[in-house]
Image (cartoon, rainbow, N blue to C red):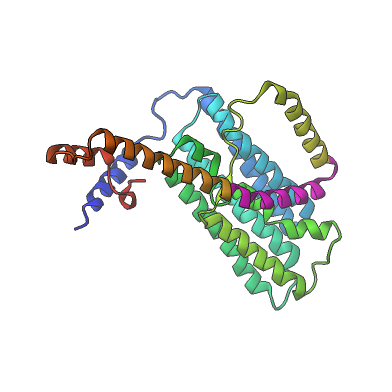
Amino acid sequence: MDPVIPRLEQETRRRERRPLFRHSRIPVRMLVPNFFTLLGLCAGLTSIRMAIEGHFDWALYAIAFAAFLDGIDGRVARLLKASSRFGAELDSLADFVNFGVAPAFLLYNWGLRDADTLRSFGWICLMIFALASAMRLARFNVAADEDVPKWQKNYFTGMPTPAAAIVVLLPFYLERLGWFAVQGAGVKVPTLMYVLTIAFLMVSTIPTYSGKLMGERISRELVLPIFMLAVGVVALLFTYPIATLAGGTLIYMAIIPVSWSRFKSQQARDAAAAGAAGAETSAATGGAAPAEGEDKRLSGLKGPPEGQRLN
């Protein structure tokens, strides 16, 4: 019998017994982040309705509004010290609807509802996108308990679902800007291939920049430029929403190879530093192997192998 199975069963029973809230009386501040999450979920459901009724621009705006709320609810929770297991689960379910289902409905009703030959194939591609977002969220929840170096918190594993929801709509942006018409298989087939590419990026292990550590400390000289940049982006988003989202999508896609390169470079530096530290330790101890009892004690401190970590 695999020795890991009993530990997995024990961990599962422990998590099932753990209550959603630790205390019988919940502070009001614990509810504030969940209000933002529920408001974002309402925006996602409204986007689905707007897409069904043919109001595609409003469907897009609702998804963008949900992405904005998703970006602040976690920060509000950390600011108020109001993080909870209930909030984390609710956030994942809302993200699946807002950024997995709503974009799929928008793309289907925009470009595939009236198609004859590609309707079924297009729906399959959009289902793959929605399923990829669900698997991406499940992997994110499992990996949240893992201990990683601090610098790795500045990267996501794969494309995050809110970013994927905005990026996957690039064909819609370009059509709204007048670059092409949505009719014809010559446009719809590349669009579906693009949707599958974004689905792959979500479930891949390609590191993408998250910016989580960017807000911890900034130089004093950068305060005013950051304010001006933020105001400029918001002004562009309200004045030219489609063009701004299209430009932001292209910039984000161009940053992914840079993020991957920087992640691999930092990973190589960590490996080199660990090797140098091991060589120094070996030289200090004269290369002697640890005693049998000490070796067992050290192996116990290392925990289970990488493939047997409890998540």
| Residue 272 located within the stretch drawn in magenta | no
Front-most of 22 and 287?
Answer: 287
Judge from the rendering whether residue 2 lies leftward or rightward of residue 272; answer left or right: left
| Residue depicted at x 33% and y 52% | 307
Judge from the rendering whether residue 215 lies leftward or rightward of residue 274; answer left or right: right
Residue stretch in magenta = 239-259
Can you say whether 178 is above or below 20 in the image? below
Front-most of 21 and 206?
Answer: 206
Can you say whether 36 is above or below 171 in the image? above
Can you say whether 37 is above or below 24 in the image? below
| Residue depicted at x 68% and y 49% | 252
x then y, percent, for residue 6: 22, 49
x then y, percent, for residue 303: 27, 42
Front-most of 221 and 208?
Answer: 221
Judge from the rendering whether residue 55 lies leftward or rightward of residue 142; answer left or right: right
Asked where in the image residue 184 lies, by quadrant, the reply is: bottom right
x then y, percent, for residue 103: 66, 55
| Residue depicted at x 25% and y 47% | 7
Q: How many marks?
A: 0
x then y, percent, for residue 204: 52, 57
Is residue 98 in sight in this rendering?
A: no
Is residue 181 in sight in this rendering?
A: yes
